[in-house]
């Protein structure tokens, strides 16, 4: 009788527990990864995903670890520091979420790859440099010889992520830990990076543990899925089984978190409302330094946006989509009057005068909510000070009781009630979650009763369940107040849920525009179709 040989796991976590100052954050995780396998660890922020991954390499100095982390049969929690330093990068490598902070800004990307090869593989400087150029080429960076000498800030987000991947793969690891490796990238770049990672994984035979909250990426990449909630591993299994027949309520909640279109849909009547905002031939150019003698006499410009025509009616949403460098941010800044522009930009007859005094009235009518709620809120100001700032500027005659009542009403409207948050107005932003901070940012904009809100990637920094909550809130506010939205995003699901009209930008040009139904479901331009292919409507 033939015995079935069971292949030992490459990595096996047995009852892994992580605590900080006696407070447990990861509770008895059991997970195994086989050689060449692709496993996704999913969950919301605070679920313990990243802490679990960092604990594998013992990168959390202040953490108390217990249980076992078996690497090819050896417990990494019992290995001396010198052995862990050898294993890190050599046998187990890691790609971090934000390459700009993970890469050394004082070294070229080539030097950082070469350094790994010299330290881990003992290669000579010249051989390591040659191998580094080859690795940059393998990860899809154009002109790798020139990029070898570039510093991280001289590369785009996608190029930096590729460079970091080259650093991680330099020592040919057996396991790659990828912690939210595509969060900061556009939709098409996300799929490119995932496709590249899949190709390199097949070529090298390494295993990959993908840590993410993006379920669309998991569908494209993983063989197996493990779901974490509040430090507990609540479900794991084959990709198809978990996605089609989830057993745990939390897994079902994650899978049901795709934004839905429940907001205001304008009637298809014959009468057209007068536009709130109208742009004709809107163009944005930036001055460019020209090297040499000729640069002294002739000024050159880089055109970020070429002659865009669009309008936004009261109570409707215009969604603008496109990759990084397409001109989305320049368009938003022009609408907000933050940069010079050419062409016509009219808010019911008003336009920006490039004067704080003359633009004050228009500033009240046009407000903005930024991508990162933590970065856009002053950490030195309380919630009351943050939300009241615009009100005090635009309504200086208002008394303190009136201001406080208005602030509390607006915060309650965005879902932050003083009854649920004691001493709400005196708290600071760090005391709130990401979704709650975004609600504070919304309250700050809404408190002055604007006619138009510019929403710059309003949900990209949030977990999937929180994204759905914020989008539902925006839909409700639009229905209630008739406020118009200009939504800048690369997330097609956000546009499917929010937009009435959609405009597609490519390299500063408007390549397609029309109703959301037409552009998102029957696109005529090849570029639009390529963007939509990254977010199939399932």
Image (spheres, rainbow, N blue to C red):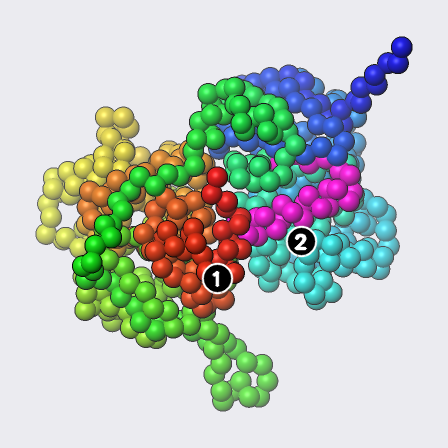
User: Mark 2 against mark 1, which lies toward the viewer?
Assistant: 1
- Direction right: furthest residue: 1
Q: Quadrant of the N terminus?
A: top right
Q: Nearer the viewer, residue 428 or 198?
A: 198
CA separation in Å, label 2 and label 1 = 31 Å
Q: Position of residue 408 (x, y in %)?
A: 20, 36
Q: Quadrant of residue 137?
A: bottom right
Q: Residues within 10 Å of mark 1 (few under 14, many from 20)?
A: few
Q: Residues within 10 Å of mark 2 (few under 14, many from 20)?
A: many
Circle 1: element type: loop
Question: N-terminal of the two: label 2 or label 1?
Answer: 2
Mark 1 — residue? 525
Q: Quadrant of residue 394?
A: bottom left
Mark 2 — residue? 163
* Residue found at x 65% / y 32%: 223
SS assignment for the magenta stretch, majority: helix
Span shown in magenta: 187-210
């Amino acid at each position: 009788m033939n015995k079935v040989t069971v292949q030992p796991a490459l990595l096996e976590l047995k009852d892994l527990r992580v605590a900080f100052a006696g407070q447990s954050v990861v509770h008895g995780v059991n997970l195994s990864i086989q050689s060449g396998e692709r496993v996704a660890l999913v969950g919301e922020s605070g679920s313990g995903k990243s802490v679990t991954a960092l604990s594998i390499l013992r990168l959390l100095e202040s953490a108390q670890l217990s249980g076992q982390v078996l690497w090819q049969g050896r417990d990494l929690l019992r290995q001396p520091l010198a052995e862990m330093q050898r294993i890190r990068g050599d046998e187990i490598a890691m790609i971090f979420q934000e390459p700009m902070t993970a890469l050394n800004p004082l070294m070229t990307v080539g030097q950082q790859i070469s350094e790994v090869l010299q330290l881990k593989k003992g290669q000579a400087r010249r051989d390591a440099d040659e191998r580094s150029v080859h690795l940059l080429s393998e990860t899809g960076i154009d002109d790798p010889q020139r990029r070898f000498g570039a510093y991280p800030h001289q590369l785009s987000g996608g190029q930096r992520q590729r460079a970091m991947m080259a650093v991680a793969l330099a020592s040919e690891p057996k396991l790659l830990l990828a912690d939210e490796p595509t969060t900061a990238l556009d939709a098409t770049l996300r799929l490119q990076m995932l496709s590249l990672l899949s190709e390199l994984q097949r070529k090298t035979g390494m295993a990959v543990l993908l840590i993410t909250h993006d379920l669309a990426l998991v569908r494209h990449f993983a063989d197996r899925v493990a779901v974490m909630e509040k430090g507990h591993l609540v479900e794991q299994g084959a990709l198809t089984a978990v996605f089609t027949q989830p057993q745990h309520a939390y897994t079902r909640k994650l899978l049901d978190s795709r934004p839905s279109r429940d907001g205001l849909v304008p009637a298809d009547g014959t009468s057209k409302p007068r536009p709130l905002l109208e742009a004709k031939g809107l163009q944005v150019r930036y001055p460019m330094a020209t090297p040499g003698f000729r640069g002294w006499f002739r000024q050159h410009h880089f055109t970020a946006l070429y002659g865009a025509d669009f309008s936004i009616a009261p109570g409707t949403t215009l969604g603008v989509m496109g990759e990084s460098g397409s001109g989305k941010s320049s368009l938003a800044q022009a609408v907000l009057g933050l940069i010079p522009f050419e062409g016509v930009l009219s808010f019911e007859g008003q336009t920006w005068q490039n004067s704080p005094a003359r633009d004050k009235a228009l500033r009240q009518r046009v407000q903005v909510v930024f991508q990162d709620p933590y970065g856009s809120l002053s950490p030195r100001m309380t919630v009351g000070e943050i939300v009241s700032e615009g009100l005090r500027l635009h309504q200086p005659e208002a008394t303190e009781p009136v201001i406080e009542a208005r602030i509390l009403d607006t915060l309650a409207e965005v879902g932050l009630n003083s009854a649920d948050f004691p001493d709400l107005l005196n708290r600071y932003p760090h005391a709130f979650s990401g979704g709650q901070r975004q609600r504070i940012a919304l309250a700050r904009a809404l408190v002055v009763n604007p006619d138009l809100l510019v929403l710059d990637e309003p949900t990209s920094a949030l977990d999937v369940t929180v994204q759905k909550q914020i989008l539902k809130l925006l839909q409700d506010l639009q229905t209630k107040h008739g406020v118009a939205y200009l939504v800048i995003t690369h997330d097609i699901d956000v546009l499917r849920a929010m937009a009435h009209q959609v405009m597609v930008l490519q390299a500063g040009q408007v390549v397609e525009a029309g109703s959301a139904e037409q552009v998102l479901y029957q696109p005529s331009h090849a570029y639009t179709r390529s963007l939509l292919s990254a977010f199939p409507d399932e």
